Image (spheres, rainbow, N blue to C red):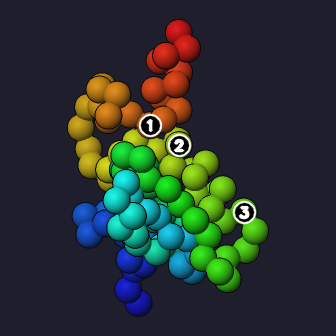
Amino acid sequence: MGRCPAAHPDDPTPCTGPVLVSVLDAVNASADGCEHHGARLLASLDRGRVYPLPDAPPGAAIRTFTAAAALRPFCWLDGPRTGPSQLSDIDNRARHDR
């Protein structure tokens, strides 16, 4: 079985469920995906957005958005992460609140 369209080719993780969300970038290019890969893609985009697909259960887009906020961009890549563009939204807010 293949993975959802939102899964990055270098991301080794499997899908965690059916395709439920659509993730759009700043110019409205989109990829549909499971909540897991939707979150990982959203975390890697600047000004990305997520929308539920018509058959998605209530809260799918909110769960994806919330999960993305805790993920680093391109979280499947190793290496030190110190710059704001390399940290999760939650990490950046924590740094700002200090």
Could you tell whether 53 is left or right of 39 in the image?
Answer: right
Q: Tell me which amino acid carries mark 1.
A: Ser
* Circle 2/circle 1 CB separation < 8 Å: yes
Q: Tell me which amino acid carries mark 2.
A: Ala
**Front residue of 27 and 60:** 27
User: Regarding mark 2 in the picture, which secondary structure is present there?
Assistant: helix
Disc 1 crowd rating (10 Å Cα; few below 14, some 14-19, many 20+) is many
User: Regarding mark 3 in the picture, which secondary structure is present there?
Assistant: loop
Badge 2 or badge 3: first in the primary sequence = 3
Q: Which mark is residue 69?
A: 2
Could you tell whether 12 is left or right of 19 in the image?
Answer: left
Give x and y (percent) for residue 5. Answer: 38, 77
**In which quarter of the view is residue 88 placed?**
top left
Is there any visible trace of residue 75 in the rendered image? no
Q: Which mark is residue 88?
A: 1
Is there any visible trace of residue 7 in the rendered image? yes
Q: Which residue is mark 3?
A: 59
Disc 3 crowd rating (10 Å Cα; few below 14, some 14-19, many 20+) is few
- Per the model, the C-alpha gap separating discs 2 and 3 is 15 Å
- Per the model, the C-alpha gap separating discs 2 and 1 is 6 Å
* Residue closest to the far right: 58
The number of numbered discs placed on residues in the rendered structure image is 3
Q: Quadrant of the N terminus?
A: bottom left
Tell me what residue is drawn at x 46 percent, y 75 percent.
32
